[in-house]
Amino acid sequence: MDSNQHFYTVWTHRSAQSIFGAASHPVVRNGELLCFATEERAQAECDRLNAGAGGSHVHYTVKPAYGHANSLASPEDGLALLSEAFRRASQRGMGESAIGAAKS
């Protein structure tokens, strides 16, 4: 049995031509990381999002994420841990941006 569980996240990428500049980050929907157990399901959602993006400066891709099976009771536990980690990281990043904007 594989010791690592694989999950697939959907990421959004904004081009440098955007008025907000270039950036990449995982997609969050309803406060949860958009994460799938199979690459096929993640790619299907990615394709759907790209079709709706039209000619914008945004496109979506799929990236793998890994969790150690011996530390997780189920795939849902891994998704929850991954989602929580990204949520915390994005909150730290938003706080730093808000402080930087307030100083300027």
Image (tube, rainbow, N blue to C red):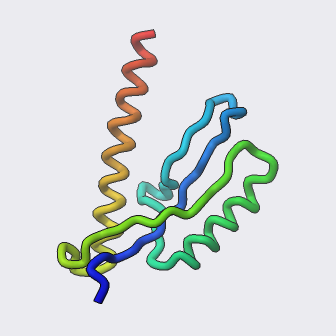
Q: In screen coordinates, is 49 left or right of 76?
A: right
Q: Answer above or below: position of 93 versus 85.
A: above
Q: How many labels does the image show?
A: 0
- Give the residue drawn at x 42%, y 59%: 32
Q: Position of residue 27 (x, y in %)?
A: 51, 55
Q: Answer above or below: position of 36 versus 88.
A: below
Q: Which of 26 and 68 is in front in this view?
A: 68
Q: Residue furthest left?
A: 71
Question: Could you tell me which quadrant the C terminus lies in?
Answer: top left
Question: Could you tell me which quadrant the N terminus lies in?
Answer: bottom left
- Give the residue drawn at x 63%, y 65%: 46
Q: Where is residue 93 in the image (x, y as percent from the top left)?
A: 38, 35
Q: Where is residue 3 in the image (x, y as percent from the top left)?
A: 26, 80
Q: Nearer the viewer, residue 94 or 62?
A: 62
Q: Residue furthest bottom?
A: 1
Q: Answer above or below: position of 58 versus 47.
A: above
- Give the residue drawn at x 50%, y 62%: 63
Q: Which residue lies furthest to the top in this view?
A: 104
Q: Nearer the viewer, residue 94 or 22?
A: 22
- Give the residue drawn at x 42%, y 55%: 31
Q: Nearer the viewer, residue 28 or 55?
A: 55
Q: Which residue lies furthest to the front in this view?
A: 2
Q: In screen coordinates, is 57 left or right of 64?
A: right
User: Hey, which quadrant is residue 19 in on the image?
Assistant: top right
